Image (spheres, rainbow, N blue to C red):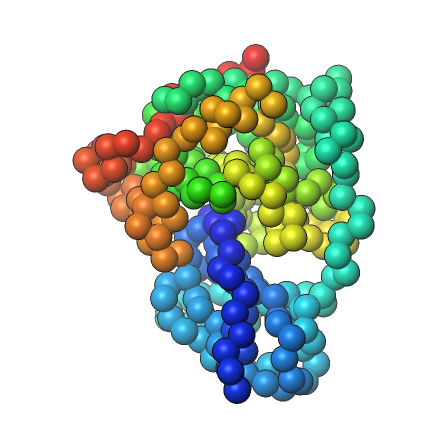
Amino acid sequence: QAPLARAPALREPRRWPRAAVVAMADATAFTFQVPQCEPGCTLKVPAPDGVSLKIPLPPSILPGDQMLMGKGADGNWTVSKVLRGVAPQSHWRSAEEMAADCQSAEAVRVRLETTKGPIFISVVPSWAPVGARRFLQLVDEGYFSDIAIYRAIEHGLIQFGVVKSTDPRSTRYEKLPDDKLVGIPYAEGVVGFAAAGPGTRKSTVCIMKADFRTQLGKGEMGTPSTETPFGMVCPESMATMHAVTCLGDIPQCGGAGPNPIELETLGNDYIRSQFPTCDFVSGASRA
């Protein structure tokens, strides 16, 4: 389920242009944007599992196109989808418009209890109706109890929601269909679900610590996407959100932070023994 950190866009000499990668949190899918390169060239692309892929580009693939890669049961990476490059977004909602949305009659205020203090979030259903409904369901049904903030990256994001595989919560919720893009940028403080590809949002939440609008949530208005924020951290809680201990990225994305697979297998005992400074979400409620 979705990572939202991006590697620097590097260009190697001669025949191996390197693509900038946006990986998914469970390391079975990632996307990259085709860099400036000659038609039909071969790209060198680092996969989240550490494999260096060499991908020959068909002549029809152009610089700026987005390529979605998926990892099969056999461990091999293949191209799942190609999206024609989109011009820079000109229809992002402004910060003022987003603030007004968060104060509107439809907005639902949620109090997230963490070991660093409460974080208040404004949920705006019109931004992502399916995602907002699920998040509020998780809040109302007590899902966010003793949840490790296992992924926290300086100038990146914080991520939480993984539970032990034997925990009843792990199988209680179905994967969600994607919401449609409505022009909400991945700005600092924006809240959304992580995903491992189309139609896979479930219960893992991401909060952005920086502005990622140039990398995430791009596409034509009305296009179904996993990258559809449903809310935003309230201004008075931004400092608390930024105070969450940053243990680094997950190993699947090259970091030294907690491994979500180990967390699913061993539960919070793994976190508390190996990462004792990890922060937790202890509860959530409508405020």
Image quadrant of residue 36?
A: bottom right
Q: Quadrant of the C terminus?
A: top right
**Location of residue 224 with respect to 210 vertically, above or below:** below
Q: Which residue is drawn at 47% across and 18% down?
A: 118
Counting from the top left corner in percent of width and height, residue 110 is at 56, 19
Counting from the top left corner in percent of width and height, residue 263 is at 30, 41
Query: Can see residue 162?
Result: no
**Location of residue 259 with respect to 123 vertically, above or below:** below
Counting from the top left corner in percent of width and height, residue 212 is at 60, 47
**Location of residue 246 with respect to 113 vertically, above or below:** below
The number of discs equals 0
Relative placement, left or right, of 253 versus 101 is left
**Location of residue 270 with respect to 118 vertically, above or below:** below
Relative placement, left or right, of 138 versus 52 is right
Q: Which residue lies furthest to the right in this view?
A: 91
Q: Which residue is drawn at 61% across and 18% down?
A: 109
Counting from the top left corner in percent of width and height, residue 234 is at 60, 23
Q: Which residue lies furthest to the left in this view?
A: 273
Image quadrant of residue 185?
A: top right
Relative placement, left or right, of 128 versus 161 is right
Q: Which residue is drawn at 72% across and 67% down?
A: 84
Query: Can see residue 121?
Result: yes
Q: Which residue is drawn at 80% across and 46% down?
A: 91
Q: Which residue lies furthest to the top in this view?
A: 287
Image quadrant of residue 61?
A: bottom right
